[in-house]
Image (cartoon, helix red, strand yellow):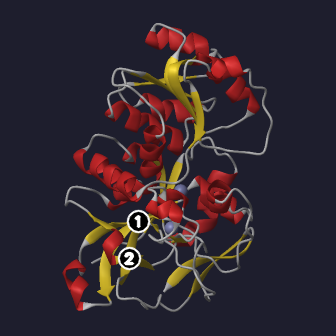
């Protein structure tokens, strides 16, 4: 099959490799129909390991020959047990992670932080393999019990956005965002926009999304109920006053994670509000402890729970969110270099790029 291999940092190659082998009863083979390029894929490309940084809090080197891509959907074309034969031909979203279910974190309801997680789209959790499974390929290994069967009206590219939307569901779950409350998203990339849409779907009255990029604000502006803010023209406090009537909010979702965003936005939290940092970095920022009085909280958000994935799937299926509006480019696998260039160059036109394969038959 054709697959894009990350040979080593900054070296992608489209090549022919053997089909993934189904070695466990619950393994299935999915013919990939759509696979999004996530911001974290750009970091793997550069030699970082964002999963390890966000989940374990430290860097772990990546092995060579990973197939990137964890935002994927497709059709089940092979199963490894009669138990799963009913899945053959089914259009599915692929859940890209499988946790161990046995460790203290899994057993205490923190499976998103499981250190034994197996991950599709990078090498986490797999034994030594010639090629690590991922979605930038014609076919991808998946788990029969972690598929999201798609309703006929849902497009493959929409279901492929479930992974990033699941990150949004998890982030909103980290905050006590009351119905009728106000949410402020700092950073309006696909993660920030996913969070904003989930906050709105959960009943927030005002959702502001701040991003200096005109393209991001243009895409955010297409969503009724979201207020796009240009932080180069307006302070966050002024934007909150303009949109919500007062300079405070119940939740801040920070996908930028700089000292400057922290300093500007923390004082805007209402009593009992939550500051959720989704871009944890090694940096120091001054903290006046009084700023977290009245039960204000500062926390982080990593990955997603299984139930977050199911909720993201439902939100897409019911049309409660619009994820297709994020996609600015659809390219075949062969144009991988162009796809990465579009995103790495900080292009003014590229927001979400999706590899689109021939419709599986
Ligand atoms: Zn991702
Ligand atoms: Zn575990």
Residue 232 visible in this rendered orientation of the protein: no
**Looking at the image, residue 85 lies above or below residue 277:** below
Q: Residue at x 67, y 64 (%)?
A: 44
Tell me the residue that label 1 is attached to. Answer: 95
Observer-nearest of 119 and 6:
119
Badge 2 marks a residue whose secondary structure is: strand
Q: Are marks 2 and 1 in contact (CB under 8 Å)?
A: yes
State the residue position of label 2: 143
Which quadrant of the view contains residue 160? bottom left
Expressed as whole percent of the image width and height from the top left, the position of residue 297 reads: 57, 30
The quarter in which the C terminus is drawn is bottom left
- x 69%, y 63%: residue: 49
Residue 206 appears in view: yes
Q: Nearer the viewer, residue 137 or 286?
A: 286
Where in the figure is residue 280, as x and y percent of width and height?
68, 44
- The crowding category of the residue bearing disc 1, from other C-alpha atoms within 10 Å (few below 14, some 14 to 19, many at least 20), is many
């Amino acid at each position: 099959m054709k697959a894009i291999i990350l040979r080593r940092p900054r070296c992608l190659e489209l090549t022919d490799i053997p089909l993934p082998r189904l070695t466990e009863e619950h393994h299935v083979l999915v013919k990939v129909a759509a696979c999004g390029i996530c911001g974290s894929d750009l970091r793997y490309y550069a030699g970082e390991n964002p999963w390890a940084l966000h989940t374990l809090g430290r860097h772990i080197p990546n092995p060579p020959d990973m197939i990137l891509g964890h935002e994927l959907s497709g059709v089940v074309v092979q199963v490894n047990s009669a138990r799963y034969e009913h899945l053959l031909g089914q259009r599915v979203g692929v859940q890209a992670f499988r946790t161990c279910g046995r460790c203290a974190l899994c057993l205490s309801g923190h499976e998103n932080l499981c250190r034994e997680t197996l991950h599709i789209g990078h090498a986490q959790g797999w034994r030594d393999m010639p090629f690590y499974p991922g979605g930038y390929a014609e076919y991808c290994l998946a788990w029969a019990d972690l598929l999201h069967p798609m309703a006929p009206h849902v497009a493959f590219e929409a279901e492929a956005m479930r992974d990033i939307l699941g990150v949004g569901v998890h982030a909103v779950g980290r905050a006590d965002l009351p119905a009728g409350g106000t949410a402020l998203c700092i950073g309006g990339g696909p993660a920030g926009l996913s969070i904003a849409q989930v906050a709105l779907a959960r009943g927030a009255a005002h959702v502001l999304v701040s991003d200096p990029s005109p393209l991001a604000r243009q895409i955010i502006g297409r969503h009724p109920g979201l207020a796009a803010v240009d932080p180069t023209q307006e302070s966050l406090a002024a934007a909150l006053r303009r949109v919500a009537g007062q300079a405070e909010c119940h939740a801040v979702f920070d996908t930028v994670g700089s000292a400057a965003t922290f300093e500007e936005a923390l004082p805007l939290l209402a009593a009992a509000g939550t500051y959720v940092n989704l871009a944890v970095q090694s940096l120091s920022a001054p903290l006046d402890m009084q700023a977290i009085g009245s039960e204000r909280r500062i926390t982080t958000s990593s990955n997603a729970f299984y139930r977050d994935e199911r909720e993201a799937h439902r939100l897409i299926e019911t049309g409660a969110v619009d994820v297709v509006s994020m996609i600015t480019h659809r390219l075949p696998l062969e144009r991988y270099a162009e796809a990465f260039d579009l995103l790495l160059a900080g292009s003014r036109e590229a927001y979400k790029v999706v590899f689109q394969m021939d419709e599986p038959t």
